[in-house]
Amino acid sequence: MAAGVAAVDWGAAWLAPWRATGEPVAQRIVRGDTVHSALQAALGAGRGAMRFVPQSELPDGTAYEQFIFDTRHVPTRDNLHDFFNGLVWLQFPLTKRRLNQLQARAIAADGVHAVRGALRDALTVFDENGAVLDAPAPLWQALNARDWRRLFVELRPLWCEARLVLFGHALLEKLVYPRKPITAHVYQAQAAMDSAASLDAWLAQQLQPEHLVAKPFVPLPVLGIPGWWPGNENFSFYDDSLVFRSAPRKNNHTMGSAAL
C-alpha cells in the first residue's frame, strides 16, 4: 500500500485541487499508517459522527452504502481505491453525503440486486468516475458534439478559461498510472468553482434523482486536455478513433437550461 501511494504524482495537473488535502495523508501512509487511520487524522474533530473505520467493521451481509448511511462510518481498505474515496469524503463531504443518502434511499425502495436500477447506476457512475467542468460555451458545444478536433485543437486557447475538477475516486485511482483511454463522465458546472467548499455546496444541491436518471454526463478523455499530458501537444494524439469516438446518433441529454 505504501508503494502505491508513493507512486502518486502530486505534481500532475489533475491533482492540483487535491494536493493540499491528499499529500499529507499520503505521507502518513508511506510512514506506516493504515489508510483509515491516516484519513481519520486528516478528518480530525468537528465533522459530526463521521469516521473512517477498518473494512472489518462492515458486517457480513450489510450493504456498504447502507452501513455508511446508518452509522456515518466509512469502511476503508488499505488500497488506492479507498485512499482516493476517503480524500473525496474529506474534500466534498456534502456531495458524498448526498450521494450516500440517495443510494440508501434506492436500496430501501428496491433492495440490493445484481443489476442496479437507473438511479443507483447514475449515482455509481458519478461517484466512481465523475468530474465537473466549468468552461466557455464553445467548448461545451464541441464536447457535446464529440468534435474532438475543434474541442482540443481549434479551440485550444479557450482551455485557459476552463477548469475541470475530478470527483470520481476510481478515476483518480486510474490516473496514478495514466493511459490515453482514461475517460471521465463530466457534469457541467453552473456555479463558481473558486473553492472546494463552494463547489461542494452547489453540487450537493444539484444531485436530484430526476436529473441523475437521465445521466447528464458527457464522456471526456481527460489526457486530451491541454497541459495535462505532453503527448497531446502533437495533434495526431486526437486521431485515435478508439479513444476519441464520434457522437452517438441519439440526442444528448440536457440538464435544466444548459446542455450536457
Image (cartoon, helix red, strand yellow):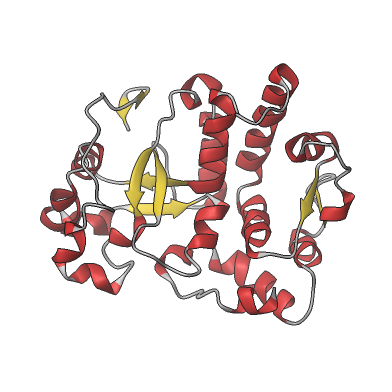
Which percent across, then down, holds residue 165? 44, 53
Horizontal relation, residue 70 to residue 158: left or right:
right
Q: Which image quadrant: the N terminus?
A: bottom right
Exactly how many numbered labels are in the figure? Answer: 0
Which percent across, then down, holds residue 192? 42, 44
Q: Is residue 199 above or below residue 171?
A: above
Q: Is residue 61 visible?
A: yes
Quadrant location of residue 61?
Answer: top right
Quadrant location of residue 62?
Answer: top right
The residue shown at (51%, 30%) is 206
The residue shown at (60%, 40%) is 95
Nearest the viewer among 222 and 91 is 222
Q: Is residue 229 above or below residue 209?
A: below
The residue shown at (66%, 73%) is 26
Q: Is residue 187 above or below residue 257?
A: below
Extreme-front residue of the structure: 114
Horizontal relation, residue 34 to residue 217: left or right:
right
Q: Which image quadrant: the C terminus?
A: top left
The residue shown at (27%, 54%) is 161
Q: Is residue 198 visible?
A: no
Which percent across, then down, holds residue 169? 57, 53
Quadrant location of residue 227?
Answer: bottom left
Which percent across, then down, holds residue 159? 24, 56
Extreme-bottom residue of the structure: 31
